[in-house]
Each structure stands twice: as C-alpha cells, then as structure tokens.
Image (spheres, rainbow, N blue to C red):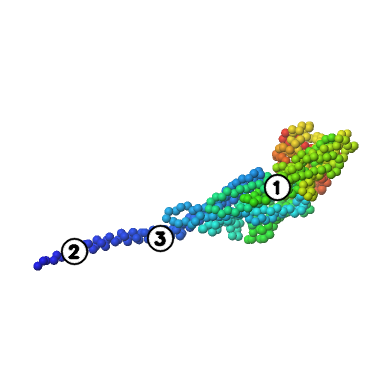
Amino acid sequence: MRTRKHTPARSSVSLRADTRAVSPVIGAVFLLAIAVLSIGVFQTTAIPALNSQVEFEHSQEVQSDVVGLAATADRVADGGRAQRTTVSLGLRYPTRLFFVNPPPVSGTLRTTEAGTVALENVRAAGETGDYWNGTTRTVQTRAVVYAPDYNEYGAAPTTVFEPWVVYDIAGDRSLARTATDLVDGRRISLVALDGRFSRSAPGRVSVSVSPASAPVETVTVANGTDPVTLTVPTRLRNDTWAELLADELDRAGAEDDRYVTAFSCEREPPSPCGNLTLTLERGTYELALGEVAVGDHASEPSAAYLTDSDGNASSVLETGRQRLAVAARDRFDNPVSGVSVTAAVTEGPGTVRPVSPVTDGDGRAAFVYDAPDDVEETQSVTVTAQFGAGDARRTATFDLRLVDRGAGTTEPGGDEPDPGAGGGNESTSAAAVSTVGGTVDSSNVGGQGRGREVSFALRADRSVTVTGISVATRNDLAGRQYVDRDTTVGGSVPSTTVSGQFSVAIRDISGSGDLGVSEFVDPTSDGADLVVTVEFADGSSRTIGIG
C-alpha cells in the first residue's frame, strides 16, 4: 500500500506569499487617487487664483497702454505728424504641466459714437472775430474705450480715454489715471478725437494716430457779454471732476492763477456726469483747438473762416506795391490747404493780382496790391479777399493807406517808418514782426485788486525771442500805471520764443475803468494812449501805438 505524503505546511507558506503581493498594488492605486484628487483640487482652486493674478497684472499693463495712447495723441496734435503705438488687448495664460488653462483672453479697444463739445460767449479780435463772435460753436469728439473680458478677474475696470482725461470705471466707481488739461490757467485746450477703430485680440495690436487738424495753433479770445462757458461730454463722475479741477477752481474770483468760477454735471453721482460745463472768469484766454484721428475713416475739416495774416493796416506809396496774405482756417483754428481764394479792390484806386491764390500747407494764399502811379492826396483803400459764398466769416478785409509822396508814410501801429525797429535793419527780430488785424481788446482782469488787460495779435515771419514788454500811458491814461502781473506773449511769460501769429496779453493797467482803446495807431501820434515796446533777444525793439 502506497503511503500519501502530507504537505500542509508548504501550502500554508505559499498562500501567505500571495497575500503580501497585493499590498503594493493597493498602495499605488491609493497614491494615484490622492494625486488625481490633488490635481483636481489645485485645478479648481489654485489655477483660477493664479490666472486671476495674471489677469490683474495685464489690467495694469493695458491701463498704462491707454495712457500711452493719450500721450501719443497729444504728440500728434503738437507736431502734426502721424504716429503709431501698441495696446495689449488680451493675454495667453502661461503653460502649466498637468493643468488645463482657459482659452486666451481677448479684450476690445474701440472708439465710441461722437459727442458734442460747445463753446459759448467766445469772442476774438480782428478777422478771427468774424468766426469767434460770441455765437455758440460746437465740435464733435469721440472717446476710446478698452473693455476687458477676463475669466477670473471680475472686478477689472473699463479704461476710457477722453480728450481731456484718462480714467477707469468699475461699477459705480471711477478713478482718474491722468490729470486734466482742459483748463490750465488762462489756456483752454481741446484736441478732439475722430476716426473709427474696433479690435479684439489676445495680444498687442498697433493703433495709428494721425493729424486731422494739427499742429494745434492758439487764438486769443475773450468773453462777450456773458462769461465763457465750455461744455464737454464725459462718463466721469461729478466727485472725480471736483478732484481734477481743484487747482483751477476759484468760486470767489479772488485767486490770481485760478479762473474756473463754477462747474456742473448733467447728472449727480453715482451716475456718470453726462455733460460737464465749466464757467470761466471774465477776461482773455488762449484757446488751443485741434483734432486727431484714431484708426481710419476720419473726416477732414473744411475751411470755416478766412483771416488776414500779412499786410493789413499798411501804408503804400503811389507807384508802390504791398503783399497781402490771408489764412484759411477750419473750426479748430488750424490752417486748411487747397482753398481757392479771390481778392479785389472794393474801395479806392489800384489793382490786386494773385501770387498764390490757392492756400498752401500753412493755409496761406497771397496777393499783391499795386498802387496807381499818381494820387492827388493820401486816401484809404480797401481790398477784400474771400472764398466760397463770401459771407462775413469767409471774407478778410485789408484797410490800406495810399500815400501821396508828399504826404508822409507813417503807418498805424508803427509799421513804416518804425522808430523802434532797429534802424531799418530788416535782419532784426523787430523787423520780422508786424501787427495783425486792426483791433485791440481791453477787459477787466478777474481777481481782487486787479486792473485792466489789453490784448492784441502780432505775427513773426520767422522765429524770434521776446525778452520783455514795457508800456507807457498817455493822454487820459497818463495816471494809470502798468504793473507786470502775468503779461504773456504767445501764452507764455517772457523770455519766450514765438513764430507765426501769436498773442500779446498785457496785465495789468491799474484801475477798473474802461481804457477806451480799441485799435492800432501811430505810436508817435497824439492818439496813442498806450505805447507798447516789445523787446527782443537780438537787442532790437518794436514800438506799437494803441488808441
């Protein structure tokens, strides 16, 4: 009989070994589950937080880019040449191994529909006064808006570039990113925005800014019967405007360097302002207007008015001739080229012939008045230039004096001969400067203890540096003193360099009573109540009579 071997111990050992082999597998599965769970938690909590930080940093970047766009617009307005800049509209999230990011963010940069800017009660001297005659003048302007579209940063603001300030809007809160240059002392600045632009992208885009009416030129203006008011469209809140205008606001009219007496908004906070209206003190201001285009499809401003730029109030000898120049300007007071101008003698003898009857890049057209060979006595001649329909604002008038050789040649305003022009040396700065128009403005200077100011326009055929102004009072004004209190040349305190047409604002002639002066006269005549001497860096000087 075969005996069966009993091996229970061996079977028991084999079973225990198989049980131990399962433990590492279970541990690996458990660790994998923990890893997947951790990744899931990180994906749903940490990744959104990290992406929110990335979006916040991009928001700060794009706000700086919009401020840079505004600075580019200012440079184009000042220089008259197109420029480009870039704005970061969106972003791509950084790559993160094992984690999933949302798709790239694409914000939108666009121009808005046009709003209306209104200037009321604004008057200017000379031919410019045919346009700036107190009638309400309006211009259209747009704004540029950047709207973000982030996945996580829900409190991101919308950034707005209006011609006078850049600011952020988030809900019912607003924050100015720049100061405002709408009013700075006696300077009113407005560079309107035109053009069409709308882009959405996950990265940087190029934005073109081109001159529509630039470079900016200034015009000396004053209030009419009522104070000057300026109304602009804005989404900024009333309380934010109060902060921006704090350095310009002078409700009592007692501060010498603040001229905004009041401001108001169409709507109260927390609503946007809607339309902001500034009221200015009575007096003279430098008005600087212009227009730039953001993107494409900008309209080209047409000629709005014609002004004399050279030759008015001149004396012409018999057989002599006089160059007469006009300038065509748009509603922003900037030159317009390609305008056909005609001119003719409308009173008195003599003829006019064209030299360049179509305005050039500086907006100028030129003619020559030819005097007859012989006249019996000194007499007045009127030459009228015009374009288009020839209404008052599209017409410039030259008042000339045709002189018999035996009757003398002194010209009102001190042009010929000029006792202060450096002895007839045509290379001097004084010889390069002439009066513009035939009228002079006089008005009260706002502020306690202030007197009167006198303003008029001059033109420099080339760049000249004015170092000082002196004033002598005569006749009924002999007892009224001239005290230099912010007298300006071209909007700046001498010493200053100017060219082309520029304004002179003399502040102050003591006393509050009307000066009774309104025009240029011969500085050596009895009718000269004020004799103004303009001094130049080359040592020459120009003497101007006002009566």
Q: Give the structural element (helix, strand or loop) at label 2.
A: helix
Residue bearing the label numbered 2: 9
> On the rendered structure, is 499 left or right of 321?
left
Position in image of residue 197 (x %, y %): 61, 52
Q: Quadrant of residue 318?
A: top right
Which part of the image, by quadrant, shows the C terminus? top right
Amino acid at pointer 2: Ala
* Badge 1 density bin: few <14, some 14–19, many ≥20, Cα 10 Å: some
**Contact, CB < 8 Å: mark 3 with mark 1?**
no
Q: Residue at x 76, y 50 (%)?
A: 132
Amino acid at pointer 1: Ala
* Badge 3 density bin: few <14, some 14–19, many ≥20, Cα 10 Å: few
Marks 3 and 1, how far apart at CA: 65 Å
Instruction: Give the label on residue 37, or none.
Output: 3
Q: Which of the pair 374/165 is nearer the observer?
A: 374
Instruction: Give the label on residue 521, or none.
Output: none
Amino acid at pointer 3: Leu
Q: Residue at x 78, y 50 (%)?
A: 389
Residue bearing the label numbered 1: 288
Q: Give the structural element (helix, strand or loop) at label 3.
A: helix
**Contact, CB < 8 Å: mark 2 with mark 1?**
no
